Amino acid sequence: ATRLEYAGFWSQAGAVSRYQCAGYFWAAVPRDHWPEEREHIDRVWEGENGDCRQEIVLIGQDMDRDALNAMLDDCLLTEEEIMTNEGEWKKLFTDPFPKWKMGIFGS
């Protein structure tokens, strides 16, 4: 909730994990910097949120799917939190990740 313009990437196998910035969501990039070939962008674009979304893939043996879903659901913003502006989110939530450096659109 503190880095709306960025897509993050997290990979974990057992105790080994890696996280990094995967780039900007296209919704955060000025349209004059979009590629000419926009088929992929159009395919994933949804309403006012554009391409901003979360995709989670879990692979493993003997996982408790219901317990995992419940833990992930607990991470979602509440309706009240969603209704606050993103500037307030930065006050409400601690961002555990280091600053990501990005190219010409970076802040």
Image (cartoon, rainbow, N blue to C red):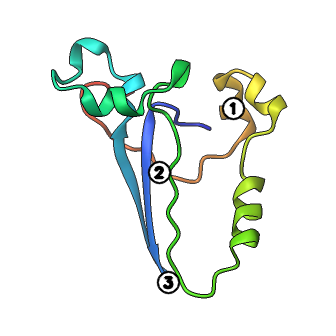
Q: Secondary structure at mark 1?
A: helix
* Picture residue at 40% right of the left edge, 23% below the top: 28
**Residue 62 rendering spot, x and y as whole percentages:** 62, 87
Quarter of the image where one finds residue 45? top left
Q: Position of residue 24 (x, y in %)?
A: 36, 34
Q: Nearer the viewer, residue 68 or 94?
A: 68
* Element type where label 3 sits in the image: loop
Residue 37, percent from left and from top: 17, 26
Q: Mark 3 touching mark 1, by CB under 8 A? A: no
For label 1, the residue is 89
Q: Amino acid at mark 2?
A: Pro
Q: Is residue 106 visible?
A: no
Residue type at mark 1 is Trp
In the picture, the disc for residue 98 is 2
Q: Residue 40: percent from the left, percent from the top?
A: 29, 34
Position of residue 80 in the picture relative to residue 103 (left or right): right
Q: CA distance from mark 2 to mark 3?
A: 22 Å
Going from N to C along the chain, the mark reached first, 2 or 3, is 3
What residue would you read off at disc 3?
A: 14
